[in-house]
Image: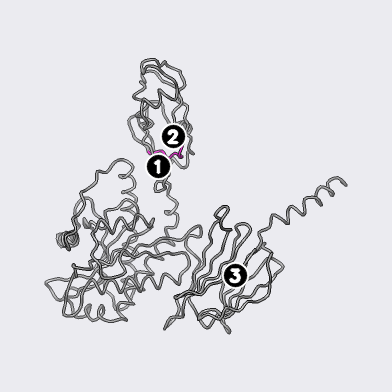
């Protein structure tokens, strides 16, 4: 018993050292915000809440202790008065005394070895006129959700025109208002394909979204129609088999031809292989869910009239990287819609509708952000052979059975059959030991794992592709 007590006492200093520590608190005043950075010795859970009378932000860090001064520090920026530190029984607390009601955003950053420690970042933005959007917990705490907003047209392509109203200017204003709304919400990062009156090809807009690592591409437009009574909002998602109506196809043709404005040449269509085909199935399903979310909310919003969800072959939505939708915010050919889109209040209403639609979608579909098929890991195509089952394929390829099912959209009721192709994710360098079966050839094994026959021969010191035998174990790298 005495030995156990001594051992426990020896461990106490080590246990104490294992607790995360706040090693520093920094702040900087920027043009559009005040940033407060809390440096940590290791990653830590945190909880952020607000207090009123007076206004303040309270960051609680359970199980964390201070390794820095607790003295209050004066900030005196347009958003923050002071930063205070409180030592609590259950951990540490950092309080920001605010200059009235403000918008804010909080996120964590992992350490950069040898350069930067683990950090929690609090951005406080200037107070807005009107009510501040209610804060909710981030829908996906592991990282920010990246929303790419695409204000349609621009530059030499004005889009729809009615009097002094230009589609390119209206949709850019809506996108900027959306970005401002998202900036005060936890868990989102917003990229605009254009922030000024600029000509962009549709291919370039998609590339911007892809380079940003977008989780959703939302293209914003206005509509026109020969019938001035046509009004309301329409939400489109990509159709690979034609449009849901002739009118929808006319719109698709109009939007796709925008590539030619300003002498910008459109891209050719890329061939879709198995991996892209499987990703496209999921992208289309998620795009439809997002479009439905926007449609349902529009129906509940006073002063708006949803014309439903439609399919069209819109070039801007032809991406397998993320769900994408195109929103027609109203008809400039209709007097009521024109009045709505021509006013700041109306464009703010459009922005609020779309922001809330996006937030609702991701709160319901946060798990889609973890889909391994959309990871940057290397992918190969495995052709199922006679006698294979999912467990043996997973074991042979060094992946988990769960991941193999997720990547291929399979469940326990799905059966596989010889000749079926499955997508298998690998690491940068995979090593698989393949046992030669009757009837197999070296070229067939190479095709099965997506590597060259010459590489297999070199890695296994095989002089001739004909010198393999049944039962022989061959190392496959790739």
At label 1, counting other C-alpha atoms closer than 10 Å, the crowd grade (few under 14, some 14-19, many 20 or more) is some
At label 2, counting other C-alpha atoms closer than 10 Å, the crowd grade (few under 14, some 14-19, many 20 or more) is many
Query: Height in image: 191 above or below 177?
Result: above
At label 3, counting other C-alpha atoms closer than 10 Å, the crowd grade (few under 14, some 14-19, many 20 or more) is many
* Disc 3/disc 2 C-alpha distance (Å): 46 Å
Q: Please state the extent of the stretch shown in magenta in the rendering.
A: 423-429
Residue under the image location 53 percent in, 59 percent down? 109
- Describe residue 83's horizontal placement relative to residue 369 as left or right: right
- Describe residue 230's horizontal placement relative to residue 208 as left or right: left
* Disc 1/disc 2 C-alpha distance (Å): 10 Å
Q: Are marks 1 and 2 in contact (CB under 8 Å)?
A: yes
Q: Disc 2 marks which residue?
A: 390
* Disc 3/disc 1 C-alpha distance (Å): 42 Å
Q: Is residue 426 magenta?
A: yes
The mark that comes first in sequence, 1 or 2, is 2
Mark 3 or mark 1, whichever is nearer to me: 3
């Amino acid at each position: 018993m005495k030995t156990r007590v001594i051992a426990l006492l020896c461990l106490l200093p080590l246990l104490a050292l294992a607790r995360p520590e706040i090693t520093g608190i920094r702040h900087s005043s920027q043009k559009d915000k005040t940033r407060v950075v809390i440096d940590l010795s290791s990653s830590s859970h945190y909880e952020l809440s607000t207090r009123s009378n007076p206004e303040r932000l309270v960051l609680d860090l359970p199980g964390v202790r201070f390794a820095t001064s607790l003295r209050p520090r004066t900030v005196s920026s347009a958003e923050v008065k002071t930063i205070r530190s409180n030592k609590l029984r259950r951990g540490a607390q950092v309080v920001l005394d605010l200059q009235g009601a403000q918008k804010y955003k909080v996120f964590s950053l992992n350490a950069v070895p040898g350069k930067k420690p683990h950090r929690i970042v609090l951005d406080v933005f200037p107070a807005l006129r009107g009510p501040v959007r209610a804060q909710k917990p981030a829908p996906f705490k592991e990282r920010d959700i990246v929303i790419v907003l695409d204000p349609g047209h621009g530059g030499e392509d004005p889009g729809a025109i009615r009097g002094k109203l230009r589609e390119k200017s209206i949709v850019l204003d809506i996108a900027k208002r959306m970005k401002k709304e998202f900036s005060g919400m936890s868990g989102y990062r917003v990229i605009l394909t254009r922030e000024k009156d600029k000509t962009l090809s549709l291919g370039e807009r998609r590339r911007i979204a892809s380079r940003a690592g977008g989780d959703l591409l939302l293209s914003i437009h206005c509509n026109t129609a020969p019938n001035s009574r046509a009004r309301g909002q329409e939400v489109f998602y990509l159709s690979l088999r034609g449009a849901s109506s002739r009118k929808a196809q006319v719109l698709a043709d109009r939007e796709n031809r925008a590539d030619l404005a300003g002498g910008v040449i459109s891209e050719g269509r890329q061939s879709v292989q198995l991996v892209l085909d499987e990703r496209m199935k999921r992208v289309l399903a998620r795009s439809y869910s997002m479009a439905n979310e926007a449609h349902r909310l529009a129906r509940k919003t006073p002063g708006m009239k949803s014309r439903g969800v439609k399919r069209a072959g819109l070039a801007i939505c032809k991406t397998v990287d993320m769900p994408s939708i195109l929103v027609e915010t109203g008809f400039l050919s209709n007097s009521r819609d024109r009045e709505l889109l021509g006013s700041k209040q109306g464009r703010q209403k459009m922005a609020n509708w779309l922001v809330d639609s996006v937030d609702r979608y991701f709160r319901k579909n946060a798990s889609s952000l973890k889909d391994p098929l959309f990871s940057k890991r290397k992918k190969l195509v495995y052709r199922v052979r006679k006698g294979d089952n999912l467990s043996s394929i997973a074991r042979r390829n060094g992946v988990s059975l769960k991941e193999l099912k997720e990547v291929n959209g399979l469940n326990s009721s799905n059966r596989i059959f010889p000749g079926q192709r499955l997508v298998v994710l690998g690491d940068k360098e995979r090593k698989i030991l393949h046992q030669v079966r009757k009837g197999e050839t070296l070229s067939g094994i190479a095709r099965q794992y997506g590597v060259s026959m010459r590489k297999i021969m070199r890695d296994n010191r095989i002089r001739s592709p004909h010198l393999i035998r049944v039962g022989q174990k061959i190392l496959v790298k790739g």
